[in-house]
Amino acid sequence: MSGPSRRRPRRRRVPGVRPLLPLWAAVLAAAAGGLALDASFPSLGIWALAPVAVTLSLVSLIGRTVWSSLLVGLAFGAAFWFPHVDWAAEFLGDMPFSWVPWIALASVEAFFTGAGAILLTLAYRWFPAGRWGRLLLLPALVAAVWTARELVMGNWPYGGFPWGRIGMSQSESPLASIVSWVGVSGLTFLIVAFCAAAIEVFRVGRPRLTSLLPAAALAVLLVAVPQWQTASAGTIRVGAVQGDGPTAYFDEREPGSVIQAQLDASEPLRDEQVDVVLWPEGGVEYDPLQDAGTAARLELAARAYGAPILMNAASAAGDLVYNTSMLWTADGVAAAGGLQTHAKRHPVPFGEYVPDRAFFERIVPDLIGLIGREYTPGTDAPLVDVGGTLVGLAICFDVIYDDVIREGARDGAQVYMFQTNNADFRGTDENLQQLAFARMRAIETGRSVVNLSTVGTSQVIAPDGTTVSSLGIDQAGVLVGDVELRDGLTPGLVVGSAIQLVLLWGAAAGLAAVGLLHLAGRRRPPAGGRGGRRRSGGDAARVEAMFR
């Protein structure tokens, strides 16, 4: 007798949606997309690769199961994040296990990228059939979900890390102008929507000329909309000093060598007429509010330059320590109107403070013990008044947080001055990536930006994003010139936060709606089924008809 026949288990199929690629090819496509996205940012800066990256990611996710979409999303996230933030391995210098911050950061970001990929897959799986619904509404839903993933990753955990947003990759592209209308998140949404609409042209059946209309309209919108023009409001003459001092966390230094490097590089300003002298983050190693010698040197320098110094140092207030920018005059703290200050709003977790220190010390005590800094987030306005000119501020990584930039503009900032210290990441792409973000902020706000680093690259950037003057990496020097002032708010500043809320909650509501519609459709009996009656009505059918 022959034994019982054994059936091979059927492969699980996603109902209604066929994968465009087998799993092995999807993983390769996703990884290629992640590498392409990294290449769209500096130092390569091939901005046109960002839409290619998005397209590869979406194509690899269509028709996947939940677990395979997680795998594909992880491939995309890892291929992007590990090379994109490899500069984090330099933070601890030559210390043992200096690679741990890089691996930890990239792994967390890749995981969240993979988790968000599941939602993109579900958007494709649950969306109802119907030609124009898939050409118009599906791309909007997919783009909203992608942008919502960026927003969540940019705010959580520990304040988030909005370093890899699609919109930020376009600082030197013809697409950048539209951020002045819709903000960085709005640009991400439009790029992803264009890519998703282009994919649907080939998925809805035989290509027709009319099927190209949504993607073509988005393409025209992206490249044809000019930058919003703010109003000219005169100029301010700035002397921005890149001291190239020993400002890295583990640099060996003599007492006072950091401020001395700034003073030495500032010497040409004695023969210039400037309205303000700008020094970078970490350009002064001692708190002038606590150290009388440092305060005296700053007062003498301000008197010699004939202008206040916008400088930065760690500053204590009781038991709390802040990363603080100060507008130091020849009168110091006795200046009329008091000393103007701004403390960094978003200190970097595991760099400028350690969240849940007791917990992480139990896991990696030696590494956590190296990070002695415990900066507290500031609450004061990111703005100072320099002789009647309102200057918006962002200290180092604060340039990537929309709330700091918008607050400064809404409070009347006419120009931005960004102070940063890239010395921990010498020889990496970090300073060029951050410089690109500063350039995007100039275009978004319609204002000039002076982006000043301790070690480079430092630039004066015009309101349209073009470079006015520059200092290269690892060189001491000074940028002197008249910087244009602007008044007025761009639409991107006015409605940018509202657009983000609409996209975040719209993605959640849209996914919930198509999910319920999908569930209702699965529960509806087929035509001619039990009871011999064909159901042609019902709420689900009527709603689905709206997408046809």
Image (cartoon, rainbow, N blue to C red):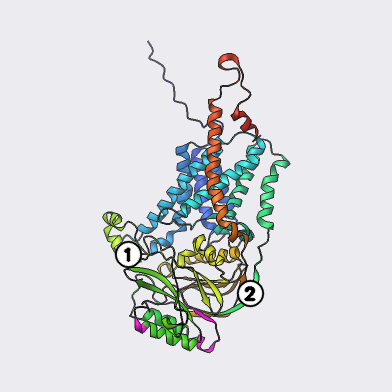
Which amino acid type corresponds to the residue marked 1 in the rendered image? Answer: Ile
Q: Tell which of 196 and 535 is nearer to you.
A: 535
Left or right: where does residue 348 sit relative to residue 144? left
Numbered range of the magenta stretch: 269-293
Residue pictured at 53% horizontal, 54% vertical? 37
Where is residue 438 shown, x and y percent of the image?
A: 54, 66
* Up-down relation of residue 274 to residue 205 (above or below): below
| Residue 106 visible to an observer of this rendering | yes
Which amino acid type corresponds to the residue marked 2 in the rendered image? Answer: Ala
Give the number of the mark in front: 2 or 1: 2
Residue pictured at 56% horizontal, 76% vertical? 389
Q: Which residue is mark 2?
A: 233
- Label 1 near label 2: C-beta < 8 Å? no
Q: Tell which of 222 and 520 is nearer to you.
A: 520
Q: Tell which of 346 and 214 is nearer to you.
A: 346
- In primary-sequence order, the first of circles 2 and 1 is 2
Where is residue 162 shown, x and y percent of the image?
A: 48, 57
Label for residue 371? 1
Task: Describe the element under mark 1 as helix, strand or loop.
Answer: loop
Where is residue 269 shown, x and y percent of the image?
A: 51, 85
Residue at far front of view:
337
Residue pictured at 41% horizontal, 73% vertical? 282
Residue 277 in magenta stretch:
yes
| Residue 429 visible to an observer of this rendering | no
